[in-house]
Image (spheres, grey):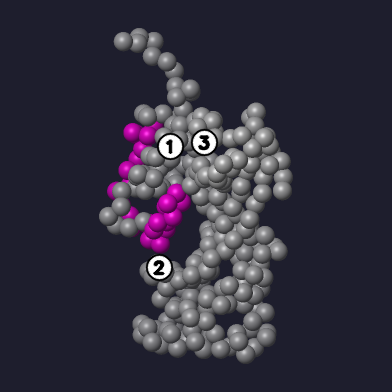
Amino acid sequence: MSSITDENLEFVETDIFDTIVYQEKPNSCYRSGAGVDILAIRFSLFKVIKYCNRFEEFELEPGVLLAHYVLKLRISRERRSCDSNKRMDRLARYRGIIARSPREKRKFKRKMVMYLSRIGAPEEEHESIIEKILEELKDAVPDLILDVQMAKFITRYTAEHFFDDTHYRAKLIPATESFIQGLEKVTSLESFGGQTCAICMEAFAAHHHLNRLPCLHSYHQHCIVQWLHINHVCPICRHPYATASAEPSDPNPD
């Protein structure tokens, strides 16, 4: 538990780290450069901040993607097969090797630790995350991405426990309407295969409308417009954009 100050408000802050491991999305973009069969393991780390008053807990901002890495785990030394049954057999053989060989299991764990450290997962969480990955690996399918989604849930309480959503939202500065209306529209989604919107966490699809900020981070149109009407910074890199207070006033008002 820690204490922080935001302008004139003092908060008591607590945090909880949690991880989910699952397979759901097809692997349509990750391939081995060596031409062998792989299992794509996608590590994602998010931060979610919640504010709490004496009556209720509420989330003010969408989760922010802090880091994202993909491990192309080689499951066979043979050339990649176009036969899904063969790929399943090779993954099953790889699982058997890890289960039977303490040496291979240690190698697997070292590789997981390397990626978890790179993405910024707390060291004390590594063992439990790896156990979840090993458990999911038992029923894994090579044609699906193995997602390892980690989140740091931060809850902030006012020291006096008096806090309301309207008060805090007043401190978030929206972007200007002219900036929002002038957002660049993404016309080609070919380069977005397998990527997700960092605001709603939904994967980009061909029929989606996207906007790109000048910092080159892209989001669903409805997500980023709603975000910028509340907060003037990029959800990923926190780069600030034009605000109403920064715009020059009209010298010739009507």
What's the amino acid at mark 1? Answer: Leu
What's the amino acid at mark 3? Answer: Asp
Q: Is tag 1's residue or tag 3's residue first in the polypeptide sequence?
A: 3
Judge the density around disc 2: few (<14), some (14-19), many (≥20) Cα neighbours within 10 Å. few
Instruction: Locate residue 8 relative to residue 244 in the image: left or right.
Output: right
Residue beneath disc 2: 25
| Picture coordinates of residue 169, whole percent (x, y) | 50, 33
Residues under labels 3 and 2: Cα distance? 35 Å
Q: Is tag 2's residue or tag 1's residue first in the polypeptide sequence?
A: 2
Q: Which mark is residue 209?
A: none
Give the residues in magenta.
Answer: 179-203
| Picture coordinates of residue 147, whole percent (x, y) | 49, 67
What's the amino acid at mark 2? Answer: Lys
**Quadrant of the rendered image containing residue 128:** bottom right
Identify the secondary structure beneath mark 3: helix
Residue 6 vertical placement versus 32 (above, below): above
Residues under labels 1 and 3: Cα distance? 17 Å
**Residue at the (45%, 49%) spot, across then down:** 199
**Of helix, strand and loop, which mostly describes the magenta segment?**
loop
Residue beneath disc 1: 228
- Of residues 250 and 150, which is closer to you in this image? 150
**Residue at the (61%, 47%) spot, across then down:** 155
Residues under labels 2 and 1: Cα distance? 29 Å
| Picture coordinates of residue 197, whole percent (x, y) | 42, 52
**Residue at the (70%, 63%) spot, across then down:** 123
Residue beneath disc 3: 165
Name of the residue lying farthest toward the front: 55
Q: Say whether residue 194 is magenta.
A: yes
Q: Does residue 235 appear anywhere in the picture?
A: yes
Q: Say whether residue 16 is magenta.
A: no
**Residue at the (37%, 48%) spot, across then down:** 220
Identify the secondary structure beneath mark 1: helix
